[in-house]
Image (tube, grey):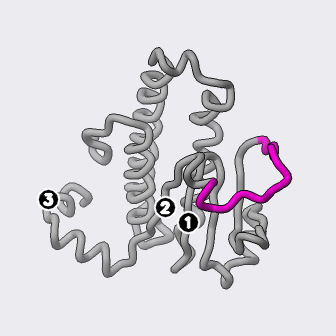
Amino acid sequence: MKWFEAINSLDELRKLYRKLVARYHPDNGGEEGAIKEINAEYEVLFKKLKNDFEHQDSYKDATDKQKQQYDWQKDIKIRETVMQLSKFKDIKVEVIGVWIWVSNCYAYRKELKELGFRFAGQKQMWYLHFDDFHRFGSKAASMDYIRKKYGSVEVKFQTEQEEKQEANKNPRRRIQAV
């Protein structure tokens, strides 16, 4: 594996994938060939890790909702959407379960609507979800509660200056990326 070395879990894989997409996607100045390699390696490693996860004894006792957490089709949709969001500057993107929440994005509200996002007025954030949603109570849940319940990963898109600084700090990685 060229892009994903020493990855042992699906969470590690997703975090590194998001960083690589933010850095090497053509919309951010990367090369198309690099992003194709990253996607191909991601898919192979994802399938392997998913199979390992599903064969763990703890997974057998999981509820249907927990088993749906790593649905391949939902994962593809989430990855594609995150890749599309990577071209927007200075926005905050969080993946919470099978939901994507976006804030600091007033300038891109039209584009978010076109991607299928909806605006949550109480939270002042845009969201998109990839699952059937059932509300279990009439009270609105806070973002802190949602983050604690489902886990949250903030997607950070690197600026060109941050990429250069990182490449200067770790020349081995720069050589590997070329």
Numbered label attached to residue 93: 1
Query: Pointers 2 and 1 in contact (CB under 8 A)?
Result: yes
Mark nearer the N terminus (3 vs 1): 1
- Give the percent coordinates (x, y) of residue 78: 60, 50
**Front label number (2 vs 3):** 2
Q: Earlier in the sequence, mark 2 or mark 3?
A: 2
Check if mark 2's residue and mark 3's residue have beta carbons within 8 Å. Answer: no
- Mark 2, residue position: 154
Residue type at the position of mark 1: Val
Picture layout, residue 51 above or below residue 178 = above
Residue topped by disc 3:
172
The amino acid beneath tag 2 is Glu
What is the quadrant of residue 95 in the picture? bottom right
Q: Earlier in the sequence, mark 2 or mark 1?
A: 1
User: Badge 1, how many Cα within 10 Å: few under 14, some, many 20+?
Assistant: many
Between marks 2 and 3, how big is the CA–CA gap? 26 Å
Distance, label 2 to label 1, CA atoms, is 6 Å
Q: Residue at x 45, y 72 (%)?
A: 28
Q: Are marks 3 and 1 in contact (CB under 8 Å)?
A: no
Does residue 116 appear to the left or right of 43 in the view shown?
Answer: right
Of residues 128 and 174, the one nearer the viewer is 128
Q: In the figure, is residue 152 to the left or right of 103?
A: left
Q: Is residue 135 above or below residue 93?
A: above
Please say whether residue 157 is one of the residues in the magenta stretch: no
What are the residue bounds of the magenta stretch? 132-145
